[in-house]
Amino acid sequence: MHHRGTNPAGEPTRAEALRAAVSVVVLLFVFLVGIRGLGEGFKLLGEDLLDQFFSATANPFIALMVGILTTTLVQSSSVTTSMVVGLVAAPENPLPLANAVPMIMGANIGTTVTNTIVSIAHMGRPEEFRRAFAVATCHDFFNFLAVLVLLPAEIATGFLSKTASTLADRLPAFGGGPDIDSPVTMALKSVLGPVRAASEWMFESPVAQGAVLVLVGGALIFGSLMLIVRALHSTLLAKAERMVRAALGGTGVAAILIGCLVTAMVQSSSITTSLLVPLAGVGLITLRQAFPVTIGANLGTTITALLATLAVSGPNSQAGVEIALTHLGFNVAGTLLIYPWGPVRGSVLAAVRRFSALATEKRLLAVAYLLVLFYGLPAILALLF
C-alpha cells in the first residue's frame, strides 16, 4: 500500500514537489530577512552590552563554548553559523571576526549532539547500541580532533581567516558590498521596514529597539530553517536515503561527496548523520563505511552560512563573507588533516570503537557524556566567564 500523494517508490508527486520548491524559496527569503534583522538589531544594542559580549568571546575557549551551547540548544549548526554571519556583518558594532571563528568551530561540535541522542534510543539492546553509538560519536571525535588542531593553529597564524579573506576578495557576487545594494538587499530592507517601525513605536530606547530586531531576526532564522528542513525532508528524504545507501558501497571519496550533496539538499547535517545511526545499529553498515559520509555532511552544512551572505550589505559585508568562507575552510582543512592519512583515520576509528565498547558496558557513561559535554560544561563555562 502506497502513501497517499506519492508514487510507488515513495517519491512525492510533481505537484507536491512544486509546492515544496515554492515553499523553500519563500522560506529562504524569510531566512534572509532574519539575517538582515539580526544585523540591524545588533548595531542598535548599547556599547556596554556589546563590549561585555566582545570581551567574553575574545577568549577563544569561551567563544568555542558559546558556539557549542547555542547549537545544542537550537539543534542546528546552520542556525548558529547564520546568526554569526549576521553579527559579523552588522552595519555598526560588528562582532570581531577573531571572536567569531571559534564560535563556528563550536557550532561544528554542537551539531553532533542530534545523532548522539538518536543512538541513545538503541540503549536497550547492548550490541545494537554499541554499533549505533560508535557511528554517532565518530562525528564527535572527528570534530573534536579538528578543533584541537586547527583552533590553536588559527590563533597562532590566522591561516583560516586570512585564506577566507583572500577568497572573499575574489568573490564579489557574495554580499551586497559597501556602496551598492543588490535587488535582494533592497527587497529585504523593504520587508524589514515595518518591523523596525513597530519596534520604534513600542520603544523609545534604541537598545530596546535593537533587542526586538535581534529577537525577531533570530526567530525568523530558526523558524525558516526548521521549515526549510521539513519541506526538503518530505520531498527529498527517499532520494537522500538511496544516495546514502549507494555511497556506502563506493569509495571513501565518493561517500564524502554524497554526504556533502545530501546535506546540501536537505539543509541539515543532522538528518544525514542520523540516517546512518539506525542502519549501523541493525548491522547494515559499518563504522568504516559511515565515517566518510559523516565527513561529507560536515562539508555540506557550510552551504547555509554562504547563503546567509546574500542578506548582508554595507561596510562590513565583506566580513560576513569571510566568516562563511572560514567555516568552509575549517571543514575542508579538517577533512584533509584526518581522512586521507590511514594511521590518523585508523586512530580516530579505534578510539571511537573503544569508547563505544566502554559506553555499552557502562551506559550511564553515555548519558553523562551527552549531558555534560554538550550541555552542562559549555553552559557553566559560558556563564562563569
Image: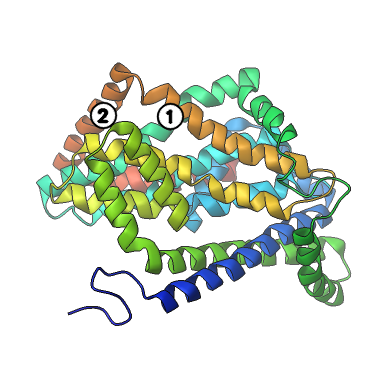
Q: Position of residue 199 (x, y in %)?
A: 81, 72
Alpha-carbon span between mark 1 and mark 2:
14 Å
**181 sits to left or right of 354:** right
User: What residue is drawn where x is 31% and y is 45%?
Assistant: 368
User: What residue is drawn where x is 17% and y is 49%?
Assistant: 281
Residue that numbered label 1 is attached to:
335
- Camera sees residue 365: no
Q: Position of residue 62 (x, y in %)?
A: 59, 37
Quadrant holding the C terminus: top right
Q: Where is residue 94 in the image (x, y as percent from the top left)?
A: 78, 44
* Image position of 152 with respect to 233: above or below: above
* Image position of 308 with respect to 103: above or below: below
Residue neighbourhood size for the residue with mark 2, other residues' Cα within 10 Å, grouped as few (<14), some (14–19), many (≥20): many
| Tally of numbered discs | 2
**Colour scheme employed for the rendering of this structure:** rainbow
* Image position of 147 with respect to 139: above or below: above
**340 sits to left or right of 157:** left
Residue neighbourhood size for the residue with mark 1, other residues' Cα within 10 Å, grouped as few (<14), some (14–19), many (≥20): many
Q: Which amino acid does label 2 sit on?
A: Leu
**81 sits to left or right of 183:** left
